[in-house]
Each structure stands twice: as C-alpha cells, then as structure tokens.
Image (tube, rainbow, N blue to C red):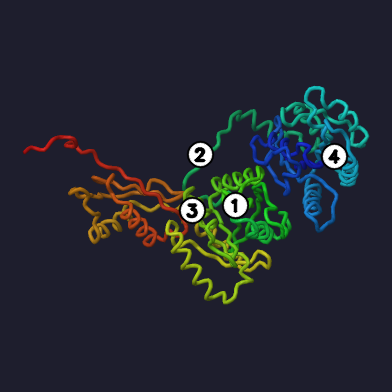
Amino acid sequence: MSFTAAIIGRPNVGKSTLFNRLVGKKLALVDDQPGVTRDRREGEAHLGDLDFTIIDTAGLEEGDEASMSGRMRAQTEAAILQADLILFMIDARVGVVPNDRYFADLVRRADKPIVLLANKAEGKQGEAGAMEAFELGLGEPLVFSAEHGDGLSALYEALLRSLPEHTAVPVEQVEEEEEHPEFGDEEDGTELDVSKPLRVAIVGRPNAGKSTLINRILGEERLLTGPEAGITRDSIGVSFDWSRRDGSYRKMKMFDTAGLRKRANVQDKLEKLAAADAIRAVRFAEVVVVLLDATIPFEKQDLTITDLVAKEGRALVIGLNKWDLVAEPGKRLLELREEADRLLPQVRGTPVIPLSGLIGSGVEKLMEAIFKVHEIWNIRISTGRLNRWLAPVIERTPPPAVSGFRIKIRYTTQPKARPPHFVLFGNQLDALPTSYERFLINGLRETFGLHGVPIRISKRTSNNPFSGRRRRT
C-alpha cells in the first residue's frame, strides 16, 4: 500500500537534495542560495522495497499571506494536508534556530506521523546540531546526509515504524511474486495509446500566465502565482484526469515551466538552471503549448521558443493568453493566425487558441486542440496513400535537374510517427534542393492534415553501379 510523504523545513536545509535522491533523478533545482524551491513538486520515490509519493516544498518563512513568502507557505501547508507522513528537516551544522521551533509547532498540529531529519551531518560536523534537535519535541532525530546518502537505512526503518499499515506487504502480492519472480515492462509503441498519460509542457516568456492557466485547468491554486515575473523556477509536473466533451476521461501530466528569456539577458545562475529545466521539460513532453501574451504577441523570443519546439519534434499549440485585454478580438484573431503561418512556416497551420487563464475563457478549446495535435503527431499514413499522392505531384512539378543530371524520386514511405517521418527513395537525392523538400512537406501537410506538428524527411539513394567510372570519348 503506497503513501505520501512531504519534506518540510526552512530554506536551504537540503529538502530538494533529499527529493532528488529518493526519486533517483535530478528533478528539483539545487543550489547553495536559499529559497530556490517555490512550488511544491511531487515525484515517485523508491527506498528499499518501498515505493511512495514524495513532495518537495518551499522553505518555510514567516510573512504576510499576500507576500511571496506567505503564498509559498500556503503551498507548503497544502502539502502537509495532502501527506500521510512529514519529513521535518533541519540543518545540523547550524543547529536549531527560532524558525525551526516555530514551524515544528505547525507540523505538530497537523497530527500526522513525523520523522525528524538532522541533515548535513556527514562526518562529525553536525553532531551538536543533531543533539539540539531533541528540544523540538518531534522525537529522536535521524543523523542524516541527503547529499552523500548517509542515513537512508535509518530513514527506511523510521518509515516502517511510522506507517506500518501503509508499508506492510499484502499477502496476495507476496504469493504473486513467488510465482512470478521477474516482470518485464512492455516496450512502448509509436501508435496513439490513450491509456497512457498525455505529457504536455506549457512554455513561454516570463509573466505570460503559465501557472495561472494550469491552476485554471486544475480548478485549484496548485501552483504559486503572482504579479512578479519569474516566480516559477522548477518545472513542476501535475497529474490529473480531464473530462472531454464526449464524456470520456483522459489522463494528463502537465508541466509548468520557468519563463524563457533571451539567452544574452540571462546572467543569474538560478535562472540559467531554471531555463535548462524548462528546455528539458520540452524534450520529455509530447505536446507543447507556447503561451503568448496576447497584448504583445510574436516577440522575437516567442519565435525562438517555437523554433526550439519544432526542432525537438514536439506537437505544438499556440495559446494567446490575456485575450480579455484585446480590443476587436475577432479581427485581431484573424490577423494573428495569418501572422503565425507567415512567421512559423515550419509548423504551418498550428492551432492558435485565444484564452484567458485568469477568467477561464478558451480553456476547453485549448484542451481539445492539444488532443487533436497529439493524434496528428501519432498518425501513420499507409505507403499506398502516400504514393498515390506523390506520383501526380512529381508529374506536375518534377524535381529540378542538377548539373545536367535528372533527380528521380521513385516512392516514399513513413517508417515512424512522433513526429511524422517520411523517407524518399530514388536517384541523385543527395542533390535534391531544400526548396523542393519544403514543397513536398507543404504538400504532405495540406493533403493529410498534418497541422501543428513538425515533419521530418530523409532520403535513401539507390546505389549506382556505374558511379565513378570514366566516360568513353
């Protein structure tokens, strides 16, 4: 039986380091600067034979509810309510400070099992601080080092003691594992599988409203928002089920990312880490929503972000956020859709959806556009259909001759999807001009409705047995 544990503590005690160690990946940003984590992040943790959900939280600080620290604390308090167990962490090198005492009272009132971790206690540097932790009244502290992995066995034992009903192995599972000692994972296919969560990344410039939009989709204040630009740092993945218009449900995993500014303007180390994390979220997503500020759309940075998405081969949807602030919305939407096709020819026909994350308009249309481009991204076209299209196209507009040699395209096929990838077979294809490739891509896009996805083309040239021989004179 699984459970959920939340890591709680003041800033810079090592919560994100422990989170990364338990999930086995460097998902959370880690730096010596305090206050790196702002949102709460969930991950699948593994410790021995225990599999559970771990929540990384922002460092607890006192502050007004409307302030940044107050909103961060509200996110942490929500994690405490969600958790079955609390991992309360202090810095053993510093010892117990007033904020530790204040927030120890907060977690004690939650009336949930608490495991006290005296972190950064590698060697003998944190022994005195670990002894001080007794005065918090949270039980015996575990001398621990998240960075080096010291104390993980003690943490495992503490979890078993604190949650016996959640960590006991069911009898049925024991019998099944004795009969089947090995279980292999099925290999992923390339066809659309609606049983798997659809991975969507929301990207854009700072203060475009990405976190506000995801909160609106979820129907709760799950992510930290505010008027300040650059609030989000980590790429936060949120899992949920979306109810479609036809009554079906679709599993989703949506990633909120840090705002991406022009690289030359990024000097701060944390912003560089956050930008790298956002780009990684794009690479792991299936569909990417590039969210634009509708009052200042298609800035140079917006085009750079969109080009990155196309190069990574992800399906694309463009969201025009803050649409409630646009004058003459009908006329403006036509202009922006034409502008999108002109500025982004590599993903011509991409859905452009007007919306407002603040008031919730356009969210349904955005989600349906996400599902549609995901279906297109997974599409595989039969070789017969492709070549019935290709033959008359080549007859009407043949490839140009290069250095007196005629380029001959014999046939094409699609070996894979995600994104659609086509292979041309023929002679002299190495000399095929890029302009003719674009002509074929545009034809494929319009004929087979491949809008909103990048299209890949590769070429296979037949071996010429007379290549390299001298001509007779």
Q: Mark 2 or mark 3: which is in front?
A: 3
Mark 2 vs 4, N-terminal side: 4
Is there any visible trace of residue 198 in the rendered image?
Answer: no
Mark 4 vs 3, N-terminal side: 4
Tell me how far mark 2 sits from mark 4, CA to CA. 39 Å
Tell me if label 1 and label 2 are in contact, CB under 8 Å. Answer: no
Residue 135 rendering spot, x and y as whole percentages: 93, 34
Task: Depth check: give the residue in front, 267 or 57.
Answer: 267
Tell me how far mark 1 sits from mark 3, CA to CA. 13 Å
Task: Depth check: give the residue in front, 129 or 261.
Answer: 261
Q: Amino acid at mark 2?
A: Glu
Q: Mark 1 or mark 4: which is in front?
A: 1
- Residue designated by label 2: 187
- Residue designated by label 4: 113
Name the image quarter holding residue 112: top right
Tell me how far mark 1 sits from mark 4, CA to CA. 40 Å
Q: Which mark is residue 260?
A: 1
Mark 1 vs 4, N-terminal side: 4
Q: Label 1: state its secondary structure.
A: loop
Q: Report the number of discs.
A: 4
